[in-house]
Image (spheres, grey):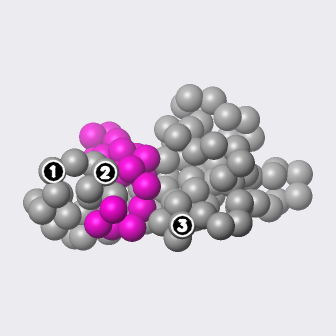
Amino acid sequence: MDQPDQARWHEGVQIISVRHGMSERRTVSVIAHELGHWWHADWCSTGAGERRAWRFAGQLLVDPVEYAAAEQEHPSAGAIARALGVLTDVIHGYRATLRA
């Protein structure tokens, strides 16, 4: 899951800070996750808030057509995530939106 030192939403100043030096797929994924916290006004980290933020990231970053193609080609969430250039947490979040 997202660690506080990777990215963080700072409510008081309306800024998302991101740790320098992360891979592109990690950076994009954690920014989308933090945008989910902002969108849902989740100012503190709870299990429900984290799941909501990863679902938001999945909806933001995963194209349904690309996901379907990757799912046909790759056997695991991790392989699908690598193929789509996101973290596995994003894929789990996207899958949760499909079940909702």
Q: Which residue is mark 3?
A: 23
- Residue 14 falls left or right of residue 29: right
- In the rendered image, residue 9 lying in the magenta stretch gets the answer no
Q: How many numbered markers are drawn?
A: 3
Measure how far apart labels 3 and 1 are at the Cα level: 23 Å
Q: Which residue is mark 1?
A: 75
Residue 9 rendering spot, x and y as whole percentages: 74, 52
**Residue at 74% over, 40% down:** 43
Q: Using the rendered view, name the quadrant where residue 79 is placed.
A: bottom left
Residue 100 rendering spot, x and y as whole percentages: 32, 40
Measure how far apart labels 2 and 3 are at the Cα level: 16 Å
Residue 77 rendering spot, x and y as whole percentages: 28, 49
Which residues lie in the magenta part?
Answer: 82-100
Q: Which residue is mark 2?
A: 78
Please state which amino acid type lies under the numbered disc 3.
Answer: Ser
**Name of the residue lying farthest toward the top:** 47
**Name of the residue lying farthest toward the right:** 12
